[in-house]
Image: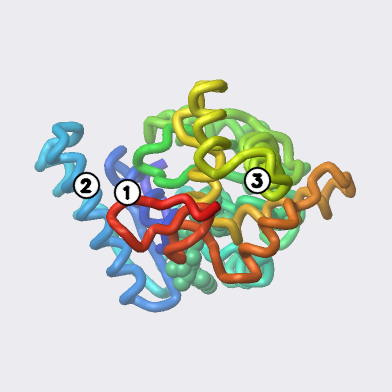
Amino acid sequence: MQIIGVIGAGLMGNGIAHVSALAGYDVILSDVALDRAEAAKATVAKNLGRGVAKGAVTQADADAALARIALTTDNAAFADADLVIEAATENEAVKRAIFASLKLKPEALLATNTSSISITGLAAATDRPDRFCGLHFFNPVPLMTLVEIIPGLATSPETTAAMQAFAARIGKTAILAADAPAFIVNRILCPMLNEAICALGDGVGSVVDIDAGLKLGANHPMGPLTLADFVGLDTLLSIMRVMQAGTGDPKYRPAPLLVKYVEAGWFGRKSGRGFYDYSGPEPVPTR
Ligand SMILES: NC(=O)c1ccc[n+]([C@@H]2O[C@H](COP(=O)([O-])OP(=O)(O)OC[C@H]3O[C@@H](n4cnc5c(N)ncnc54)[C@H](O)[C@@H]3O)[C@@H](O)[C@H]2O)c1
């Protein structure tokens, strides 16, 4: 495996391109417009520069990694790719259209970074369900060491093994998850964040006390409301809804306060307000 294609140069795509290029792969990064791909490459350059400043990467390795990232808006550029990782917008129709447009070499592997869409269902929209797999990275990709590998119903054992080898080469620890709503990490993490919001809505504790409770009482590095703001409250709500719809289990009911915050446009850090207000130099709790 030498050429990695990455489709979608957003938050996750730039990180996947970064870690792949740093591991020595030639990377082709695509987006719908060239300026988005260029912005992603600029982000990779900035993040590699941080790695150099911290002494984690040499300047020579950072320069070589950046030089290995080619940009495109044309899926024909993936003709020679050995593995293509789709990290485009979380929308099933968008992903299906991308898969329909790909003309990969027969032996190429294809993966999706989806957080919530059925791997088995997406595989059926490709010309290679046996060589298709879920490859779920975590944000920010260069720093988070986990990747979830999610075989679909038709994924071959050879494909899963190749994904494990790829994950190891880019320095990630891989875990295997079944193709069930939210896989492993979000299945466990998101209901915990949702429960923290239920506790806040029920008046069980303040934002500060709930966050301090889990940090000091459960040794979590970050309080659940801080983490929910970081993940994005809209994203958290959408994952809870996927779990509720996918399992039919009422235990995944989104917290009413979470629904209200999303209705208000209070999405957390990215919108400047969630359970904390981020407009000043330090986050200020809002309840
Ligand atoms: N953000 C996270 O924390 C996170 C974590 C794990 C997985 N994911 C998944 O990764 C994927 C990407 O998420 P993101 O947060 O990077 O989103 P994002 O919105 O930052 O980036 C998506 C990019 O895809 C591009 N795109 C849309 N249609 C395209 C097409 N036809 N061809 C090429 N590019 C196209 C968009 O222009 C955009 O730049 C989603 O499936 C998401 O669920 C996200």
The residue at 50%/28% (across/down) is 215
Whether residue 45 is visible, yes or no, is: yes
In the displayed structure, 92 sits above or below 233; it is: below
**Mark 2 — residue?**
48
Report crowding for label 3: few under 14, some 14 to 19, many 20 or more residues within 10 A (C-alpha).
many
* Amino acid bearing label 1: His
- Name the one closer to the observer, 282 or 172: 282
Secondary structure under the numbered disc 1 in the rendered image: helix
For residue 39, what is the image quadrant?
bottom left
**Mark 1 — residue?**
18
The residue at 16%/48% (across/down) is 49
Report crowding for label 2: few under 14, some 14 to 19, many 20 or more residues within 10 A (C-alpha).
many
Label 2–label 1 contact, CB within 8 A = yes
The residue at 63%/42% (across/down) is 193
Label 2–label 3 contact, CB within 8 A = no
Residue 33: x and y, percent?
39, 78
Secondary structure under the numbered disc 2 in the rendered image: helix
- Name the one closer to the observer, 17 or 183: 183
In-image side of 74 versus 61 (left or right): right
Residue 224: x and y, percent?
56, 39
* Amino acid bearing label 2: Leu
